[in-house]
Image (cartoon, rainbow, N blue to C red):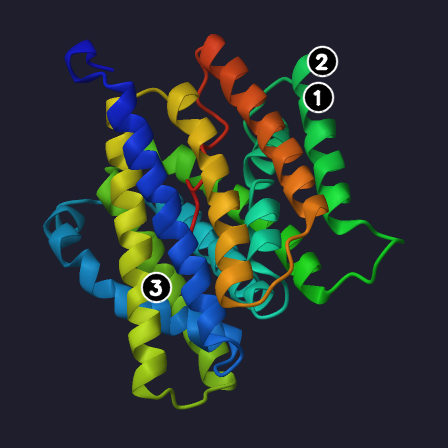
Amino acid sequence: MDETQYSPGRGIFWMAVTGLCFVMVTALVKLLGGAIPASESAFLRYLLGLVFLIPMWPAMRQTRLTARQWRLFTLRGITHTGGVVLWFYAMTRIPIAEVTAMNYLNPVYVTILAVFFLGETLALRRILAILAALAGALVILRPGFRELDPGHVAMLGTALFFAVSYLLAKILSGEVPATVVVFILSVTVTIGLAPLAISVWVWPDWRALAILFAVASFATAGHYTMTLAFAAAPVTVTQPVTFLQLVWSVAIGALFFAEPIDPWVIAGGTLILGAVLFITWREAVLKKRITPVEHATKL
């Protein structure tokens, strides 16, 4: 990072804005409810979001991809499509705070999968951090003490699919421009969601379309402000700010959706995020960039 551009305060500010944008994405999808099937909602969100890809078209036209890269992009589109559908489904089933807290598992999954796909090694301290994160997930789910909803299972799958998507992006980002990676992901996910949406199609009204366009807008804004945060300060500075997303999720759920404040969810989310912060700090010390920062594979 250029020392002349280093600004912890600015990095923290932009990361806080990023978290707020992504909480708005979650709240708007929750507001939509089950009026439209999950796969259709996800499809319309990506279809409406294609307008934001227009500035990326010149870079895409100039890029020549190999057959191997096309296969990796296709695989990433398939896995990301699965993650998106499961996320939209979970939003119709479980509270916003639980979706947010369980989403923190994504970097933990990436750390585990990197061992098998990228040849990474796990030191004892990172293994203990992973176990702590998994304990946090158990605190949230509390199997045996309450009935688990299919939405909880969907969120476990969401984090896993997004982790695979991130690892594929990690490989491809070293070979092609970032704009191309974003462009192809958006297009392949839109195509992947199309048949799923058509199979359960319900004609949306203007209110639903407006909400889904707002979802696409906040998601795009969140990714942009996240890049501003990373340009201003290192991940070890900006990552702790992601805890605010859980705070805002709890507040929005309680104030606008009458969702009770569950101290177990807050405790479990805090435990997971603490493990992620430790892993992030260790990788910064070791000069590695495998584990994604929070939101790296967000919708």
Amino acid identity at mark 2: Leu
What amino acid does circle 3 point to?
Answer: Val
Question: Hey, what amino acid is under mark 1?
Answer: Ile
Q: CA distance from mark 2 to mark 1?
A: 5 Å
In the rendered image, residue 162, in percent from the top left (x then y), is placed at: 52, 47
Q: Quadrant of the C terminus?
A: bottom left
**In what quadrant of the picture does the N terminus appear?**
top left
Q: Is residue 181 visible?
A: no
Report the residue marked by disc 1. 127
The crowding category of the residue bearing disc 2, from other C-alpha atoms within 10 Å (few below 14, some 14 to 19, many at least 20), is few
Residue drawn at (45%, 62%), measured in percent from left and top? 27
* 281 to the left or right of 9: right
Disc 1: CA contacts within 10 A as few (<14), some (14-19) or many (>=20)? some
Q: Local crowd at mark 3 within 10 Å, few (<14), some, or many (≥20)?
A: many
Residue beneath disc 2? 124
Secondary structure under the numbered disc 2 in the rendered image: helix
Residue behind mark 3: 215
Q: Nearer the viewer, residue 280 or 240?
A: 240
Lower sequence index among marks 1 and 3? 1
**Tag 3 or tag 2, which sits nearer the N-term?**
2
Q: Residue at x 41, y 75 (%)?
A: 194
Residue 15 percent coordinates (x, y): 34, 35
- The residues tagged by marks 2 and 3 sit, at their Cα atoms, a distance apart of 40 Å
Work out which residue is located at the far front of the displayed protein and give it: 255
Say which of marks 2 and 3 sits in front. 3
Between residues 168 and 142, which one lies in front from this camera angle? Answer: 142
Residue 96 image label = none
Q: Nearer the viewer, residue 184 or 132?
A: 132
Regarding mark 3 in the picture, which secondary structure is present there?
Answer: helix
Residue 135 visible here: yes
Front position among marks 1 and 3: 3
